[in-house]
């Protein structure tokens, strides 16, 4: 009997150890739901008819910028508060709306990671009344969108860090002295002078990296960006005939300064077209300064998939752009000074400050 008890105790201890992660907590089940899918926890009547519910729906339903067709920012699901249990709690992205005048005196947002599953993020909006909540949501539209988009970006970073195409990443490093995490499904490559074009087997997802000397003070302007992009693409991405080549559709291009790995960068987003042909699609690019070699490094992702929606593909490519490490960043990495996720800027910290809440980790 003592042997049986000892054996059962041993099994219990082993199971307890196996059920704990390295941080001392129990391992969580894998989260459910697709990328860019959000579950809203809010009573149906409020979701469909209240000012706060309508405001939140409008935020999540906002069109993704830079796409040729209208595509909402997120796939939206809703569940009543009392039904938020079991499988619903496993969703990867959750928004909980709590409106109670007896419990809250002001409207604010906070977020938690990995509460019921992993990976998971739960954004909670608390407010004393409907109208104040609706106004707050409208004022923070972009922060809410950016928060969930960047969370998905971080998940993509982690996947690429663990598994990427080392052969093509090494090719980029040999050619540009940069580190760039290329997905394993992207195997095709074309090289030019200071230029590399990488694509998957279907050619619907494409990555480009090229460089040029940093000599003009007008480098980070709309006109310079379009001119430089057109000249590089015309030379390196021709069509079937000599009179066909990739160009920028200048009617649908937006440029702006952004921050990547705490440094200035220039984002271009819009549509490309094949001159004298019917081909076209969306693109997004980052232009960054290589301070060691006094040059501009441009990374771009573009999609050609006229028959399908493009949100997931474009966001995946955009996330990949953030994984670029310039020579100076690689030097910091050697010295152990670069603890960034090989990719992300401080956008999550910035958004967290705007949310005016504290992150909680389980």
Image: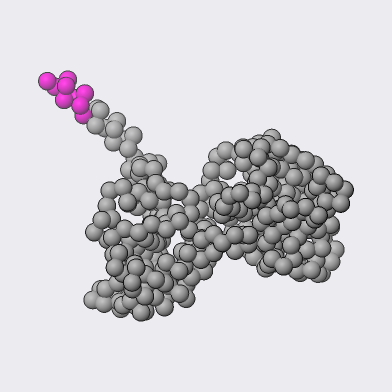
Q: Main secondary structure of the magenta part?
A: helix
The answer to whether 280 appears left or right of 47 in the picture is: right
Q: Is residue 45 magenta?
A: no
Q: Position of residue 100 (x, y in %)?
A: 26, 73
In the orientation shown, which residue stands out farthest toward the left? 1
Question: Which residue is rendered at x = 85% and y = 63% of the image?
Answer: 215
Q: Position of residue 352 (x, y in %)?
A: 47, 65
Quarter of the image that includes the N terminus: top left
In the orientation shown, which residue stands out farthest toward the right? 242
Name the one closer to the observer, 297 or 23: 297
Question: Which residue is rendered at x = 82% and y = 48% of the image?
Answer: 238
Name the one closer to the observer, 101 or 66: 66
- Residue 107 visible at all: no
Question: Which residue is rendered at x = 68% and y = 47% of the image?
Answer: 206
Name the quadrant containing residue 20.
top left
Q: Position of residue 81 (x, y in %)?
A: 27, 61
Magenta-tinted stretch: 1-9
Q: Position of residue 104 (x, y in %)?
A: 29, 75
Question: Which residue is rendered at x = 39% and y = 65% of the image?
Answer: 110
The answer to whether 347 appears left or right of 33 in the picture is: right
- Residue 307 visible at all: yes
């Amino acid at each position: 009997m003592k042997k049986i008890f000892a054996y059962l105790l041993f099994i219990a201890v082993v199971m307890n150890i196996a059920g704990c992660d390295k941080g001392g907590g129990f391992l969580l089940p894998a989260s459910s739901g697709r990328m860019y899918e959000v579950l809203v926890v809010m009573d149906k009547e409020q979701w469909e008819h209240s000012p706060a519910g309508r405001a939140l729906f409008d935020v999540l339903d906002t069109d993704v910028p830079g796409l040729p067709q209208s595509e909402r920012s997120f796939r939206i699901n809703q569940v009543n508060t009392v039904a938020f249990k079991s499988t619903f709690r496993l969703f990867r992205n959750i928004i909980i709306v709590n409106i109670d005048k007896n419990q809250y005196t002001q409207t604010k947002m906070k977020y938690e990671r990995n509460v019921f599953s992993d990976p998971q993020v739960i954004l909670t909006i608390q407010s004393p009344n409907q109208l104040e909540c609706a106004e707050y949501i409208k004022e923070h539209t972009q922060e809410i969108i950016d928060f969930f988009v960047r969370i998905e970006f971080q998940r993509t970073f982690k996947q690429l860090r663990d598994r990427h195409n080392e052969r093509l990443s090494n090719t980029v490093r040999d050619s540009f002295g940069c580190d760039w995490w290329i997905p394993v499904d992207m195997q095709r490559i074309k090289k030019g002078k200071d230029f590399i074009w990488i694509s998957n087997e279907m050619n619907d997802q494409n990555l480009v990296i090229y460089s040029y000397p940093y000599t003009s003070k007008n480098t980070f302007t709309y006109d310079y960006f379009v001119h430089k992009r057109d000249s590089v693409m015309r030379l390196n991405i021709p069509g079937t005939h000599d009179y066909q080549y990739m160009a920028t559709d200048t009617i649908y291009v937006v440029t702006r300064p952004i921050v990547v790995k705490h440094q200035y960068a220039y984002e271009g987003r819009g549509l490309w077209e094949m001159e004298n042909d019917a081909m076209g699609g969306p693109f997004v690019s980052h232009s960054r300064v290589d301070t060691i070699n006094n040059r501009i490094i441009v990374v771009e992702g573009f999609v050609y998939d006229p028959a399908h929606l493009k949100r997931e593909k474009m966001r995946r490519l955009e996330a990949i752009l953030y994984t670029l490490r310039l020579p100076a960043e690689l030097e910091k990495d050697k010295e152990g000074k670069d603890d960034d996720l090989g990719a992300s800027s401080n956008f999550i910290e910035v958004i967290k400050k705007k949310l005016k809440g504290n992150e909680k980790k389980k």
